[in-house]
């Protein structure tokens, strides 16, 4: 399993901590698409980069972090094929996998503490898409993308 990770200048330390956490706990490869500098860095750049990597199959899933998780998730969700959830708690993270088959997770470094962020990551990484009755809605999301082309 390969995880793409992205961040802006606000979330450099969170990105490093979450990368180490995933590598150690799950043994997954984590590919860095974010900045490692505290210089101002525009979140759409890394949000789009991780999203493109997910859609192309370069990575299996993506995690993106900015101050609130909002801006970077909006950037990711602009990319066709991306279903990125912004979470401040683990319940939505798990359900977003089980019902919505999210392929990207976002959270805010200024919103959730690091230990809560790890719980959100755990819930999201271990959540399995249930398919079945949920697939028709996922197909409808795809239809919206097609109508925008
Ligand atoms: C940067 O100041 C901040 O706007 C960004 O990290 C993020 O919170 C945007 O949604």
Image: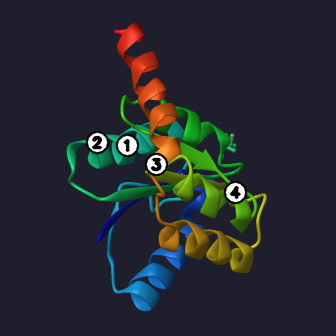
Of all residues, the one furthest to the bottom in this rendering is 24
As displayed, is residue 62 above or below residue 48? below
Q: Quadrant of the C terminus?
A: top left
Would you say the beta carbon of the disc 3 residue lies within 8 angstroms of ligand 1? no
Residue 39 in picture, x, y percent from top left:
54, 51
* Disc 2 to disc 1: CB gap under 8 Å: yes
As displayed, is residue 34 above or below residue 2? above
Residue 132, numbered circle: 3
N-terminal of the pair, mark 4 or mark 1, is 1
> Mark 2 or mark 4: which is in front?
4
N-terminal of the pair, mark 4 or mark 3, is 4
Q: Badge 2: few (under 14), some or many (20 or more) residues near its Cα, within 10 Å? A: some
Q: Residue at x 47, y 65 (%)?
A: 128
> Mark 4 or mark 1: which is in front?
4
* Spatial separation of the CA atoms under disc 4 and disc 3: 19 Å
Q: Residue at x 28, y 48 (%)?
A: 53
N-terminal of the pair, mark 3 or mark 2, is 2
N-terminal of the pair, mark 3 or mark 1, is 1
> Mark 4 or mark 3: which is in front?
3
The way the protein has been coloured in the rendering is: rainbow
Q: Nearer the viewer, residue 119 or 101?
A: 101
Q: Residue at x 28, y 72 (%)?
A: 1
> Mark 3 or mark 2: which is in front?
3
* Residue beneath disc 4: 92
């Amino acid at each position: 399993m390969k995880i793409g990770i992205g961040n802006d200048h606000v979330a450099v330390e969170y990105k490093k901590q979450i990368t180490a956490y995933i590598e150690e706990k799950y043994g997954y490869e984590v590919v860095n698409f974010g900045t490692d500098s505290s210089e101002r860095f525009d979140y759409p750049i890394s949000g789009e980069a991780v999203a493109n990597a997910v859609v192309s199959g370069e990575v299996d899933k993506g995690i993106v972090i900015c101050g609130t998780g909002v801006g970077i998730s909006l950037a990711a969700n602009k990319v066709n094929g991306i279903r990125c959830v912004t979470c401040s708690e683990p319940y939505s993270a798990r359900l977003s996998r089980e019902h919505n088959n999210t392929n990207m997770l976002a959270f805010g470094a200024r919103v959730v503490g690091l230990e809560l962020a790890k719980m959100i990551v755990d819930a999201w990484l271990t959540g399995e898409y249930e398919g079945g009755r949920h697939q028709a809605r996922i197909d409808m999301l795809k239809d919206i993308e097609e109508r925008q082309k």
